[in-house]
Image: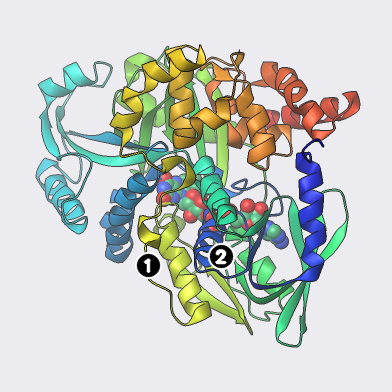
């Protein structure tokens, strides 16, 4: 008998919803919802999670992709947030070393800059102290001469020196996905493309009406509900009858990727924007540099955004101020993305100063919502919501449980040391082996199978696409190119020229005929155009 296709498995899972009452239904498939579902499933609660689009399609794939405490928040005296986050960035590494890369940050200082070198050094000492001096490396004072050899394109006039410190870079979409997959491995029933539409109370449970991507409507019964819908929190709370739903104050953040032909970095550079003095980053990524971010009030809630010419210019102004010889123009931008910060409105200050701290809010009987927070603090957020919902949390080895790809991986050196062997064993290049190991970690063998055919400049084995459909809930071309893989970011044309090949590779698995393949390509191309700037 042939094994069921991914869509048949999904249909079976959807059918089984009718026969159960879940202990908890988690709404939202971003990092917060994924964390809650994982923690709840670990506690052996019968858990269901629903996401209206794709896992991580909201803010959780549109961040700066740092696990960090955030120096900016230290400047704003958000000490609670910073100390929680600097500790969590280390745990993030332990759980998923394949997805978390320690990264040096260089913070240059010029004549007249505030804070100057001494005050910045004290700030970084406090930053390290909050992490109880557990970091990925020692902070270090660099002279102007050190900087000239380290970052030869950096502007040198009136350069005083810099401080180097360490945080970590991650793949936010795959971190979220692995938390979802782990929740599933622990027994949770998880769905992307299943949208909560309505809810009614029935005895001691909530009956939630959800819509499948094919238009079918189903009901899910649960004793408790956790709302982790990020910027949609207020809207979701209304579905549960909240008359005074939590107010959010979203801000839009844009990032751009520029090719490494213009700018090469071996460390992230902290920049102060020449116009408004906001802190920003230029961060090395696979084949270039990512520059971000903006932080502007945005009073709508959206899935996709237009990135404006003004936003791109604002970002390039900063990087060209620091690296004038790079001469980066909008033509060098090969991809962009934007997301909304789900900040809770405390009604007081300007957008960039609104607290990033999270809060758990009781929405209705047996319904809790969570807003604010950061990618870095996802586990703390999940614990706080569940503590409110359950009264207490079970202890045990939860905190040490790695994400699926992190199992048995002691650290990145272990992966580095196995690149050559993995390449030989699978008959692929070391570049392809590196991509596989630092995307799938312990699951790399399973994800590559017997495949040797590759796609894209990082030589990604095509099996990554089919694996995403059979094992990682990918249902659309967009899921594949933007979140299961990073082809959207790593290819100079947002992977538009690879879209047809990628769609063809998965069409038999998803039952796409020629028209469906064309629709996927058209949808993907239309999405790309919105980010053209
Ligand atoms: P989301 O990821 O938005 O998830 C909510 C999900 O709920 C969405 O996927 C949505 O589709 C779903 N949903 C909504 N309504 C429904 C419904 N009715 N039914 C089913 N599903 C529904 N944090 C860091 O730690 N480090 C960083 O470097 C960093 N950089 C950032 C940069 C920017 C520009 C932004 C915007 C944020 C950044 N953050 C960072 C913050 C971090 O990304 C967010 O706090 C986090 O991703 C929010 O996750 P979430 O799960 O709460 O929300």
Q: Picture coordinates of residue 373 (x, y %)?
A: 45, 60
Q: Residue furthest front?
A: 1
Q: Is residue 26 above or below residue 213?
A: below
Determine the secondary structure under disc 2. Answer: loop
Q: Is residue 250 visible?
A: no
Crowdedness near tag 2: few (<14), some (14–19) or many (≥20) residues, C-alpha within 10 Å = many
Q: Residue at x 65, y 28 (%)?
A: 465
Q: Is residue 211 above or below residue 451?
A: below
Asked if residue 163 lies left or right of residue 183, the reply is left
Q: Earlier in the sequence, mark 1 or mark 2?
A: 2
Q: Tell me the residue that label 2 is attached to.
A: 248
The count of marks equals: 2
Q: Tell me the residue that label 1 is attached to.
A: 396
Crowdedness near tag 1: few (<14), some (14–19) or many (≥20) residues, C-alpha within 10 Å = few
Tell me the quarter of the picture where residue 96 sits.
top left
Q: Is residue 211 visible?
A: yes
Quadrant housing the N terminus: top right
Q: Kindly identify which numbered label has been placed on residue 511.
A: none
Q: Is residue 451 above or below residue 8?
A: above
Tell me the quarter of the picture where residue 531 sits.
top right
Nearest to the observer: residue 10 or residue 520: 10
Nearest to the observer: residue 352 or residue 20: 20
Cα separation between marks 1 and 2:
35 Å
Tell me the quarter of the picture where residue 104 sits.
top left
Q: Picture coordinates of residue 235 (x, y %)?
A: 69, 67
Q: Residue at x 56, y 25 (%)?
A: 448
Nearest to the observer: residue 336 or residue 273: 336
Q: Residue at x 58, y 63 (%)?
A: 228
Q: Looking at the image, what colour scheme do you see?
A: rainbow
Q: Residue at x 60, y 54 (%)?
A: 184
């Amino acid at each position: 008998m042939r094994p069921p296709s991914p869509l048949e498995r999904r249909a079976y899972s959807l059918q089984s919803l009718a026969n159960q009452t879940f202990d908890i239904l988690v709404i939202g498939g971003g990092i917060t919802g994924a964390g809650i579902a994982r923690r709840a499933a670990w506690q052996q609660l019968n858990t269901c999670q629903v996401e209206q689009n794709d896992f991580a399609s909201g803010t959780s794939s549109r961040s700066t992709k740092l696990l960090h405490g955030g120096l900016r928040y230290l400047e704003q005296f958000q000490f609670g947030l910073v100390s929680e986050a600097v500790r969590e960035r280390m745990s993030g590494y332990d759980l998923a070393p394949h997805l978390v890369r320690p990264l040096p940050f260089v913070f240059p200082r010029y004549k007249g800059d505030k804070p100057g070198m001494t005050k910045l050094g004290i700030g970084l000492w406090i930053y390290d102290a909050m992490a109880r001096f557990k970091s990925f490396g020692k902070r270090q004072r660099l002279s102007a001469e050190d900087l000239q050899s380290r970052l030869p394109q950096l502007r040198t006039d009136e350069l005083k020196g810099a401080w180097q410190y360490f945080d970590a870079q991650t793949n936010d979409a795959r971190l979220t996905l692995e938390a979802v997959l782990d929740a599933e491995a622990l027994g949770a029933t998880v769905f992307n493309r299943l949208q909560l539409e309505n809810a009614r109370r029935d005895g001691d449970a909530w009956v939630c009406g959800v819509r499948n991507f094919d238009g079918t409507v189903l009901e899910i019964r649960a004793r408790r509900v956790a709302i982790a819908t990020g910027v949609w929190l207020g809207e979701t709370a209304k579905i549960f009858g909240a008359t005074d739903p939590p107010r959010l104050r979203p801000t839009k953040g844009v990032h751009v990727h520029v090719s490494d032909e213009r700018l090469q970095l071996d460390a992230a550079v902290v920049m102060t924007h020449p116009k408004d003095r906001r802190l920003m980053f230029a961060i090395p990524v696979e084949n270039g540099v990512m520059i971000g971010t903006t932080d502007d009030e945005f009073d709508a809630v959206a899935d996709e955004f237009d990135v404006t010419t003004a936003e791109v210019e604002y970002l390039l102004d900063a990087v060209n101020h620091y690296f004038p010889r790079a001469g980066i123009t909008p033509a060098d931008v090969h991809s962009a993305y934007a997301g909304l910060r789900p900040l809770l409105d405390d009604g007081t200050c300007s957008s960039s100063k609104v607290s990033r701290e999270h809060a758990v809010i009781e929405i209705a009987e047996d319904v809790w919502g969570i807003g604010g927070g950061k990618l870095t603090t996802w586990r703390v957020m999940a614990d706080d919501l569940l503590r409110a919902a359950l009264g207490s949390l079970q202890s045990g080895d939860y905190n040490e449980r790695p994400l699926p790809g992190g199992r048995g991986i002691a650290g990145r050196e272990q992966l580095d040391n196995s690149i050559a062997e993995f390449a030989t064993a699978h008959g692929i290049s070391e570049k392809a082996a590196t991509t596989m190991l630092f995307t799938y970690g312990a699951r790399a063998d399973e994800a590559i199978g017997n495949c040797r055919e590759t796609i894209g400049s990082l030589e990604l084995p095509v099996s990554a696409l089919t694996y995403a459909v059979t094992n990682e809930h990918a249902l659309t071309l967009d899921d594949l190119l933007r979140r299961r893989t990073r082809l959207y970011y790593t290819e100079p044309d947002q992977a538009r020229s690879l879209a047809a090949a990628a769609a063809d590779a998965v069409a038999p698995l998803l039952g796409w005929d020629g028209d469906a393949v064309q629709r996927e390509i058209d949808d993907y191309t239309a999405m790309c155009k919105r980010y053209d700037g």
